[in-house]
Structure formats: C-alpha cells, structure tokens
Amino acid sequence: MATQTKKSFPTEQLVVLVSEHVELYDMTNKLYHNIYHKESIWRTIGGILGHKYYIG
C-alpha cells in the first residue's frame, strides 16, 4: 500500500498576499465594499497559491 503525503497549505504566503491588499480587511478603504474588485484579488491570490477558490 502506498503512503500518501499531505501537502501543507502555505499559510504564511497567504498572510503576506492578503496583507498587500488592505481593501480586503480595512473597512475604511474605499474599495472594501467593491465585491468585484475583491473577487479579482482573491482569484489572483488563489492563482498564486495554486488553488482555485469559489467565491459565491
């Protein structure tokens, strides 16, 4: 029986990528409420991390 290794999630890289986009977490930022802009950022971050995320 072959053993499977789990691929660890790049948590630190995710934190760095999110911290570069204040509009994702700063409610005073004018783009915070722009869901289309934020969706684009999340898709970009997902692509960088090698994952596809569904935002819906």
Image (tube, rainbow, N blue to C red):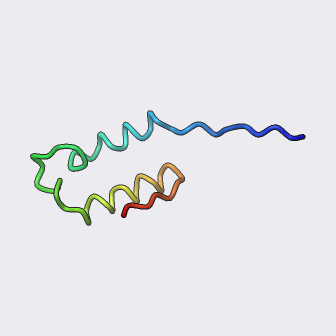
How far across and down, in percent of the image, does residue 39 sit?
32, 61
View extreme (top): residue: 12
Q: Give the mark count.
A: 0
* Residue 52 rendering spot, x and y as whole percentages: 50, 59
Query: Residue 45 vs residue 29: left or right?
Result: right
Q: Is residue 21 left or right of residue 11?
A: left
**Residue 34 against residue 14 in the figure, above or below:** below
Q: Measured along the vertical axis of the image, is residue 55 above or below residue 45?
A: below
- Please provide percent x and percent y for residue 2: 86, 41
Q: Residue at x 48, y 56 (%)?
A: 47
Q: Quadrant of residue 9?
A: top right
Say which of 54 and 42 sits in front: 54
Q: Can you give x and y, in whole percent of width and height, for residue 15 in the image?
A: 37, 37
Q: Residue at x 50, y 49 (%)?
A: 49
Quadrant of the snapshot with the C terminus: bottom left
Asked if residue 52 is positioned above or below residue 49 in the image, the reply reads below
Location of residue 30 by image quarter:
bottom left
18 over 30 or under it: above or below:
above
Write the residue at 26% across / 66% down: 36
Quadrant containing the N terminus in the rendered view: top right
User: For this view, does 12 lie left or right of residue 37?
Assistant: right
